[in-house]
Amino acid sequence: MSKTTERANFGSKLGVVLATAGSAVGLGNVWRFPYMAGENGGAAFIFIYIFCVLMLGIPCMVSEFVIGRHGAANTARAYHRLANGSAWKYVGYLGVVTGYLITGYYAVVSGWCLQYVYGSIVGTLSGDANYVKEYFTAFSSHPFKPIIWAVIFLFITHFVIVRGVRNGIERVSKMMMPTLFVLLLVIVVASCMLPGASKGINFLFYPDFSKVDSNVLLGALGQSFYSLSIAMGCICTYASYFSRQTNLLQSAVQISIVDCMVAILAGLMIFPAAFSVGINPDSGASLVFITLPNVFHQAFASMPVVGYVVSIMFYLLLSVAALTSLISLHEVSTAFLQEEMHISRGRAAIFVTASCAVIGAFCSLSLGAYDGLSLFGKSLFDLFDFVTGQIFLPIGGLLTCLFVGWVVPRQTLRDEFTNWGTIRGTFFGIFLFCVRFVCPFCILLIFLHQFGVFKHL
């Protein structure tokens, strides 16, 4: 009991929302969401995505909140306490392993963002489409440059983590999340003022439901699941720092609103500029690192200084979004080691930082410098991405919903949901129905979709 009472907590309601929103808001919102929307009909995808956040994301998030706050411990121990020694305790270990593996290769992508900040500052990103493509290929396959940037990113994350929950995670989140919104809004305004930008705005907000098929539906389901950081251990770990007064449903709704706002603003930032220079919005995953540098170069050709500043701000924005997510991922493993190995927070953080730097180095080298670093026909980078994103996350999310919906005592759920009867539980029945039936069904569809089961529907 003493360990529970001595456990660090977030210091304010704002800290809860901004820190947890920082965990959810990352490259998935600023990078993945725009190109997913671009490939799947713009506004139609957005409407479906928001519906999926309501029906899938919020119930899953509240489920992890319940486990994390009730367990008042790292993700593995929190599941263990509610599982009462049953096999369900291993779902928590799966979350820790997933978060740890993602930390390693996510640091590589985060390092790319820093490289592009540097490239924007020194002016090496200016050029035609072929030049920018060659620039990215040469950099990402370089034997040591991406590793250096990844290690720098991990050291920044480490500095935040070792300062603790309130002085590190919460304080930095209170600075970085407003910074992220300011950067977003400035770039949105600059993008929307370009000639022909209205076509991009129309694309984003006028739905074309004729393009909606099963792949779009399942893609939106998957995006809502991944962008909210479900089943990575992040949400559960952060919830262990919640106070008994934190309204779990209200917090989940607020975080989801922030998540959706960032995603839509990212679309407003990218599509008007892309349409202004005649770039297709369905450029795919290459949109951020290959297509957009050329877009900024062309769109602001008559205002080179503005284009220069916008380019720097955009990749700085990406770096901030990546950092907020990497902090939460790092914290999952740090909290686990600190509590399970009974070592100091500093020593736990050092181990996570050092080992993830090694993982990141191998993942980076597998992208071209050393082709032999591959398994099952995939580079280590792609393999880590595939295993965590397409196998561990859906399975972890599915098992969490089944655990909360059918194993955790109903009264325990109600107590956490209503803060032990101090707030109304109006939506408790809806939450329980979604967790028991809707969420497992949808997550199972996502999982099967990853392997092309619905490809021909």
Image (cartoon, rainbow, N blue to C red):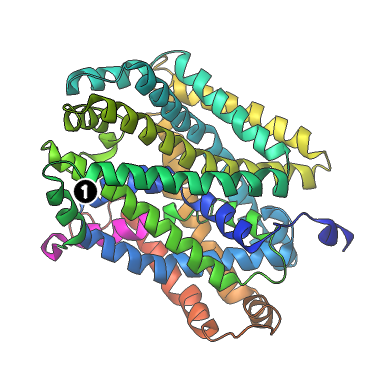
Q: Which residue is at the front of the view, 159 or 362?
A: 159
Q: Residue at x 64, y 55 (%)?
A: 238
Q: Residue at x 36, y 54 (%)?
A: 223
Q: Which residue is mark 1?
A: 38
Residue 437, image x, y percentages? 45, 76
Q: Which residue is at the front of the view, 261 or 340?
A: 261
The quadrant in which the C terminus is found is: bottom left
Q: Residue at x 28, y 30 (%)?
A: 306
Question: Is residue 220 one of those drawn in magenta?
Answer: yes
Residue 152, image x, y percentages? 56, 24
Q: Which quadrant of the view contains residue 245?
A: bottom right
Residue 4, image x, y percentages? 82, 61
Give the side of residue 401 with respect to residue 301, left or right: right
Q: Residues within 10 Å of mark 1 (few under 14, many from 20)?
A: many
Give the side of residue 330 with respect to residue 123, left or right: right
Question: Is residue 85 one of those drawn in magenta?
Answer: no
Tell me: residue 446, above or below residue 62.
above
Q: Residue at x 29, y 18 (%)?
A: 135
Q: Which residue ends up furthest to the right in the rendered image?
A: 2
**Numbered disc total:** 1
Residue 388, image x, y percentages? 48, 44
Kindly identify the amino acid type of the residue bearing the numbered disc 1.
Gly
Q: Circle 1 — which element?
A: helix
Q: Which residues are magenta?
A: 208-223
Q: Is residue 86 visible?
A: no
Q: Main secondary structure of the magenta part?
A: helix
Q: Is residue 237 visible?
A: yes
Give the side of residue 193 with respect to residue 252, left or right: left
